């Protein structure tokens, strides 16, 4: 078992986290308007929880079960710190941020992912993430930072590099154990499946995803706080210029940590307050999840109205004749009011 930081108070609280159905209330509707006329509708669910796992507010089903996809990356990256690899190999904020990233595959992104491998004396040929279409190197894959970080942990722990993606490898078992630890539940209860890059991802309830981001943003656990700080300090490395996570963290003045995942997943944490929010768009729409996130950030007051307006021009106004409008709102959960 890797070294881990004290978190017993969170574990005890999280173990009281009700994982039963939180259905009820209306989901959010995201309407694509063409010259003011509805053309398409996406439906989304959202939930806000605190570090004790209490559902504070929700829209739709807070217990909705789905895959967390790349929003899991900051938790996967905790192994860099708990294993001692980050300090042993001299990894800085830039390398920690790229380990949490779904990046654009630019030369700058690839160089930072490469530095993890260079510092750990690992041949880039050991990367097993795919070579993106139209590219020439696995380092250009959006998950290369995560894969490089996994290899560095394996090097540090003496685990085989060749099998780092296998679900039964100690590395991946440690990821599941860490997530289960944070959620206060047995690791064998977490369903595992392959993500598109080949690494295991987890099926979680929406409220569980929100809890992970409440803990990530709470600044109570040193490994999570270090990763959150790195993401906020290096937002361009987490996604890329013009991408939602980067622009929200860049313009949000350190108030919100943000990481999306495929198929309509978006997770956010209110820094320093230990509040986490998770969003799932039923049909997997990316454009809809960004509109929902801005709508709810505005409702919660997590970022300024000027920031909302600037981000809205990029992610709600899709063209001269197209805009996204979100209908509905988060409502207080009656069991915790």
Image: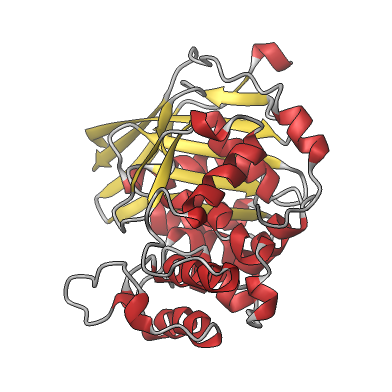
Q: Where does residue 46 sit, x and y in percent of width and height? A: 50, 31
Instruction: Report the residue at 50% width, 22% height from top.
Output: 63
Residue at 61 percent across and 42 percent down: it is 212
Location of residue 261 in the rendering, given as x and y in whole percent from the top left corner: 41, 50
Residue 235 visible in rendering: no
Left or right relative to 122: residue 2: right
Can you give x and y, in whole percent of width and height, for residue 79 in the image? 60, 60
Q: Is residue 111 above or below residue 49?
A: below
Q: Is residue 24 above or below residue 17?
A: above
Point 62% across, 51% down: residue: 305
Residue 187 visible: yes
Query: Residue 296, position in %: x, y?
Result: 55, 38
Res 53 quadrant in image:
top right
Identified at 43% across, 84% down, the residue is 108
| Foreground of the two, 136 or 46 | 136
Q: Is residue 199 above or below residue 246?
A: above
């Amino acid at each position: 078992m890797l070294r881990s930081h004290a978190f017993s108070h969170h574990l005890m609280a999280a173990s009281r986290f009700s994982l039963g159905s939180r259905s009820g209330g209306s989901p959010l509707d995201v309407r694509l308007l063409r010259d003011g006329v509805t053309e398409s509708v996406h439906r989304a669910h959202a939930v806000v929880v605190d570090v004790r796992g209490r559902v504070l507010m929700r829209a739709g089903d807070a217990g909705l079960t789905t895959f967390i996809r790349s929003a899991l990356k900051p938790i996967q990256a905790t192994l860099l710190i708990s294993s001692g690899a980050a300090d042993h190999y001299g990894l800085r904020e830039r390398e920690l941020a790229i380990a949490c990233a779904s990046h654009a595959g630019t030369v700058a992104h690839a160089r930072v992912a490469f530095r993890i491998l260079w510092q750990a004396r690992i041949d880039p040929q050991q990367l097993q993430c795919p070579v993106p279409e139209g590219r020439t190197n696995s380092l250009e894959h959006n998950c290369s930072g995560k894969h490089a970080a996994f290899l560095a942990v394996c090097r540090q722990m003496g685990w085989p590099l060749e099998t780092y993606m296998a679900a039964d490898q100690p590395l991946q078992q440690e990821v599941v154990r860490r997530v289960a630890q944070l959620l206060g539940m047995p690791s064998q209860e977490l369903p595992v499946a392959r993500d598109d890059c080949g690494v295991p991802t987890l099926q979680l309830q929406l409220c569980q995803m929100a809890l992970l981001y409440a803990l990530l943003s709470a600044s109570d656990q040193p490994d999570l706080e270090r990763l959150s700080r790195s993401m906020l300090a290096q937002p361009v490395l987490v996604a890329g210029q013009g991408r939602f996570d980067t622009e929200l963290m860049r313009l949000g003045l350190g108030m919100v940590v943000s990481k999306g995942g495929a198929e309509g997943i978006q997770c956010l944490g209110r820094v320093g307050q230990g509040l986490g929010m998770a969003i799932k768009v039923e049909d997997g729409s990316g454009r809809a999840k960004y509109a929902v996130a801005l709508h709810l950030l505005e409702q919660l007051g997590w970022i300024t109205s000027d920031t909302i307006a600037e981000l809205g021009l990029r992610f709600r106004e899709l063209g001269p004749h197209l805009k996204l409008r979100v209908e509905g709102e988060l409502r207080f959960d009656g069991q915790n009011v």
